[in-house]
Image (cartoon, helix red, strand yellow):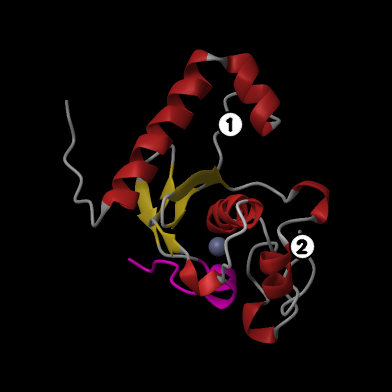
């Protein structure tokens, strides 16, 4: 029954485990799933892990609460438009709403913790897992928003 996945690094292994955890929680706690994701049984489209040295954070895709995030990320996002709206650049027209991706949420969490610990941090210091769909464990390249906003996001 056990499937073999080729993991490129520890972050990919971690995002796989996180996807399994999301699925398990969703199945085991229907009420939890409804509260977390707004709909019954619905899993987030994507999950990702972000790391800055010892700070490792998992996240899944959903709209940015209150249209707000860490100022470092916010500044990068604002080059392309407003949080929770689609980007304004012509070559990014069909992209997802800004700030909604798992990579951006994971980066936001890492930035918040690093800033709270007084670290001098830049987006280029962050490292990522591949994006993974929790339902299928399929691997996805970072979308064009993430490629534009976050240095080092993974394409494979
Ligand atoms: Zn993205």
Q: Which numbered tag is attached to residue 53?
A: none
Identified at 56% across, 53% down, the residue is 110
Residue 154 belongs to the span the image colors magenta: yes
- Residue receiving disc 1: 42
Q: Nearer the viewer, mark 2 or mark 1?
A: 2
**Residue at far front of view:** 118
Where's residue 78, x and y in %?
A: 75, 74
Cβ of mark 2 under 8 Å from ligand 1: the answer is no
User: On the rendered structure, is 73 left or right of 19?
Assistant: right
Secondary structure under the numbered disc 1 in the rendered image: loop
| Label 2 to label 1: alpha-carbon separation | 23 Å
Residue 84, located in which quarter of the rendered image?
bottom right
Image position of 97 with respect to 75: above or below: above
Cβ of mark 1 under 8 A from ligand 1:
no
Residue 20: give x, y in percent of width and height.
38, 31
Q: Which residues are magenta?
A: 143-156
Which quadrant is home to the N terminus?
top left
> Is there any visible trace of residue 150 in the rendered image?
no
Crowdedness of circle 2 by 10 Å Cα count: few (<14), some, many (20+)? many
Residue 47 in the image: x percent, y percent? 48, 46
Q: Is 134 placed left or right of 13 in the picture?
A: right
Quadrant location, ligand no. 1: bottom right
The mark nearer the N terminus, 2 or 1, is 1
Query: Which element type, helix, strand or loop, lies under badge 2?
Result: loop
Which residue bears the numbered disc 2?
A: 83
Q: State if disc 1 and disc 2 touch (CB < 8 Å).
A: no
Classify residue 91 by image quadrant. bottom right
In this picture, residue 105 sits left or right of residue 58: right
């Amino acid at each position: 029954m056990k499937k073999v996945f080729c993991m490129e690094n520890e972050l990919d292994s971690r995002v796989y485990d996180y996807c399994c955890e999301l699925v398990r929680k969703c199945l085991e706690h229907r009420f939890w799933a409804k509260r977390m994701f707004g709909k019954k049984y619905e899993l987030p489209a994507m999950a990702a892990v972000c790391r800055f040295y010892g700070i490792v954070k998992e996240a899944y895709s959903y709209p940015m609460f209150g249209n707000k995030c860490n100022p470092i990320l916010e500044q990068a996002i604002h080059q392309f438009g407003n949080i929770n709206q689609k980007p304004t650049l012509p070559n990014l027209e069909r992209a997802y709403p800004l700030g909604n991706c798992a990579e951006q949420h994971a980066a936001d969490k890492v930035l918040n913790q690093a800033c709270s610990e007084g670290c001098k941090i830049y987006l280029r210091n962050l490292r990522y897992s591949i994006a993974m769909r929790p339902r299928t464990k399929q691997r996805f390249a970072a979308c064009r928003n993430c490629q534009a906003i976050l240095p080092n996001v993974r394409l494979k």
